Amino acid sequence: MSVQTQAINPEDFAEAIADLPLSAVYSKVSELRNSIAHLHRSNEELRLFLAESKDSEEEKKEIEGYVLENEGVVTSMNERISLLKVEVERRGADLD
């Protein structure tokens, strides 16, 4: 049996990062960017598999669902990066 966790909402995330040291904020940005890169690579591999697959349409739809789920996660991670950028700039520093 697996346990699903609910992602922290953007407002709570912004509040939580306000007390972090700047180094931890930068580290979180790097972590998120790395995760996004892995999700993009995974989606590319899944799309290539789908293009070459002889699986049934039902099986392909399941894999397409994973691609869409990954895209949603990427969107959420990009929102987190935006919030982290706001926090960095609030402190008078620069993210990029």
Image: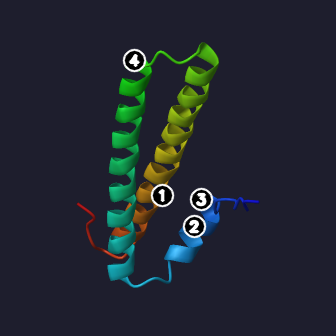
From the viewer's perspective, is residue 78 above or below residue 57? below
Q: Which mark is residue 55?
A: none
Disc 3 element: helix
Disc 1 element: helix
Q: Which mark is residue 10?
A: 3
- Mark 4 or mark 2: name the one nearer the start of the chain: 2
C-alpha separation, residue under disc 4 versus residue under disc 1: 32 Å
Residue occupying image coordinates x 55% and y 36%: 66
- Mark 4 or mark 1: name the one nearer the start of the chain: 4
| Residue picked out by circle 2 | 13
Q: Nearer the viewer, mark 4 or mark 1?
A: 4
Residue type (three-letter) at the residue carrying disc 2: Phe
Q: Which mark is residue 80?
A: 1
Tell me if 94 is positioned left or right of 54 in this view.
left
C-alpha separation, residue under disc 3 versus residue under disc 4: 36 Å
Residue occupying image coordinates x 34% and y 73%: 27
